[in-house]
Image: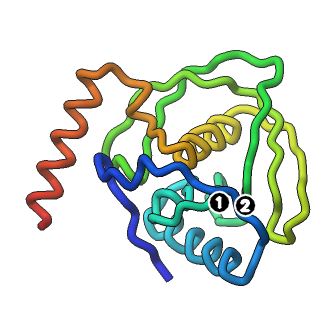
Amino acid sequence: MILDILEFPDPRLRTVAKPVETVTDDILKLVDDMFETLYDAPGIGLAATQVNVHKQVIVIDLSEDRSEQLVLINPEVEVLAGDYQEMQEGCLSVPGFYEEVTRIDHVRLKALGLDGVPYEREVTGLLAVCIQHEMDHLKGKLFVDYLSPLKRTRIRKKLEKQHKIRA
């Protein structure tokens, strides 16, 4: 089922997600729906917060052919020796806007998989950036928070205007 994606400045995007206690059938259904929503959008990453479910669940797929699904439940990252990298980021919750954001490009990811078993993985480059971007959503933070107040206000006003036009 395709879920509705909340758009900035919706205040629900600022909700801090709660850890998943147990990987249940409801969580598995949420993950399936999130992948369907991600592919429909289309995007490369989606946090549960963006679909108004305030649990620590992220789905990511950087592949062109939808073959590299990555599920992160209760994710944590540890910064490893790496460089800060400026990369243009966009967001399904901030449609149509792309801005430069600086993030570390080498992290150790710890999360639960769909089977509820913890796993660890070293991650670099675009995937490391994507994970950090999606984890920000779980903390109620958006990539526009890294921008100047002027840019953030400009984006908010444009999106508010679009929401009024659609309403």
The residue carrying pointer 1 sits among few (fewer than 14), some (14 to 19) or many (20 or more) residues within 10 Å by Cα, namely: many
Q: Nearer the viewer, mark 2 or mark 1?
A: 1
Q: Amino acid at mark 2?
A: Val
Q: Residue at x 77, y 18 (%)?
A: 82
Q: Position of residue 77 (x, y in %)?
A: 76, 37
Write down the quadrant of residue 84 in the picture: top right
| Residue 94, above or below 99 | below
- Mark carried by residue 105: none
Residue 58 at least partly seen: no
User: Looking at the rendered structure, which numbered label has been put on residue 71?
Assistant: 2
Instruction: Return the disc, 2 or 1, that comes first in the chain's sequence.
Output: 1
Q: Nearer the viewer, residue 18 or 87?
A: 18
Query: What is the C-alpha distance between the residues marked 2 and 1?
Result: 7 Å
Circle 2 SS class: strand
- On the rendered structure, is 151 left or right of 163? right
Query: Would you name the residue on which mark 1 appears?
Result: 57
Q: Residue 153 or 38: which is nearer the viewer? A: 153
Q: Residues within 10 Å of mark 2 (few under 14, many from 20)?
A: some
Q: How is the image coloured?
A: rainbow
User: In the structure shown, which secondary structural element does the residue marked by tag 1 occupy?
Assistant: strand
Residue at the left extreme?
A: 165
Q: Is residue 166 left or right of residue 91?
A: left
The percent coordinates of residue 33 (x first, y second) are: 56, 76
Q: Which quarter of the image is occupied by the C terminus? A: bottom left
